[in-house]
Image (tube, rainbow, N blue to C red):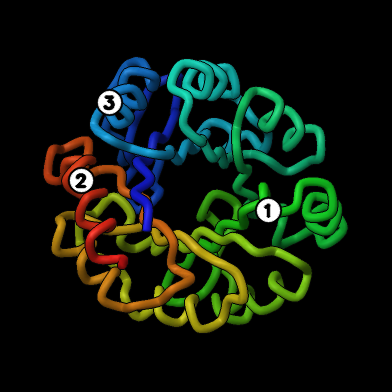
Amino acid sequence: MILLPAIDILDGKAVRLARGEFSQQTVYDADPLDAARRWVDGGARALHVVDLDGARAGEPVNLAQVERIASALGVPVQIGGGLRTPAAVAAALGVGATRVVLGTAALRDVDFLDEMVSSHGEKVVVSLDARGGKLATAGWTEQTEIPVEQAVQRLSQRGVRRFVYSSIERDGMLAGPDLEGARQVAEATRGTFVYSGGISSLADLEALVALRQVNLTGVIVGKALFEGRIEVGEAQSLLDQRSH
């Protein structure tokens, strides 16, 4: 299992939001590359970058930052936020992103999703953001009544093999992971997934590992790293030891 430090970019800076609320933001680094370099120097093997400006605008805004991070650090970078057209996806991959994380568009536009899976295969990751076990879309601003497991099954049938599962209520709250949600997604998906939301300590990572779900292949951690509650190297070492 791999640790994926999260770098959320808003107004050109590395920030964290609480429960996805733009009004509840904390700026941690004026330059996202500084944060990315800190995590990679600490032992991160990959990075999860979210273009929050892009998520809000509906098209990528911070690809220049992604390019700087990808070219400077030489680790895989997955990017999400505003990737709603084939051109946007191609642009993200063109600046050096290893994978693209699709959200709203993948759920709303079947033709777009099919084209992306056909063109880019396992470089395509679909983000499943849940509130109370039901999907939320449009940068978490619109709530649906679709159960996450149902969405996973539908998307799997269309060839999606990689997912990110995020618990919105826990995001940026340091409140511990949604273990039941992670278990449900693990049972529903034919592919692999990465968990995100609420990680505050090494014990939280151990709890996820203890689920013993072979298709849970990574954990995204943001605020706990920025606030020094977890060190990258220590966390990755734990995941390496416990995952065998």
Q: What's the distance in space between the residues labelled 2 and 3, CA to CA?
A: 17 Å
- The three-letter amino acid code for the residue at tag 3 is Asp
Residue at 47% over, 67% down = 130
Q: Quadrant of residue 200?
A: bottom left
Quarter of the figure with the N terminus: bottom left
Q: Is residue 192 above or below residue 141?
A: below
Residue 158 horizontal/vertical position (percent): 78, 69
Q: What's the distance in space between the residues labelled 1 and 3, CA to CA?
A: 27 Å
Q: Which mark is residue 41?
A: 3
What residue is shown with label 2? 224
Q: Is residue 37 above or below residue 23?
A: above
- The three-letter amino acid code for the residue at tag 1 is Glu
Q: Is residue 125 above or below residue 50?
A: below
Residue at 61% over, 42% down = 99
Pair 2/1: label in front: 1
Q: Quadrant of residue 86?
A: top right
* Side of 114 where 227 appears, left or right: left
Q: SS class of the residue under badge 2?
A: helix
Pair 2/3: label in front: 3
Q: SS class of the residue under badge 3?
A: helix
* Residue 227 makes an appearance in the image: yes
* Residue 145 makes an appearance in the image: no
How many callouts does the rendering have? 3
Q: Is residue 97 above or below residue 63?
A: below
The crowding category of the residue bearing disc 3, from other C-alpha atoms within 10 Å (few below 14, some 14 to 19, many at least 20), is few
Residue 97 horizontal/vertical position (percent): 60, 32
* Side of 49 where 102 appears, left or right: right
What residue is shown with label 1? 122
N-terminal label among 1 and 3:
3
Circles 1, 3 touching at the beta carbon (< 8 Å): no
- The three-letter amino acid code for the residue at tag 2 is Ala
Residue 111 horizontal/vertical position (percent): 87, 58
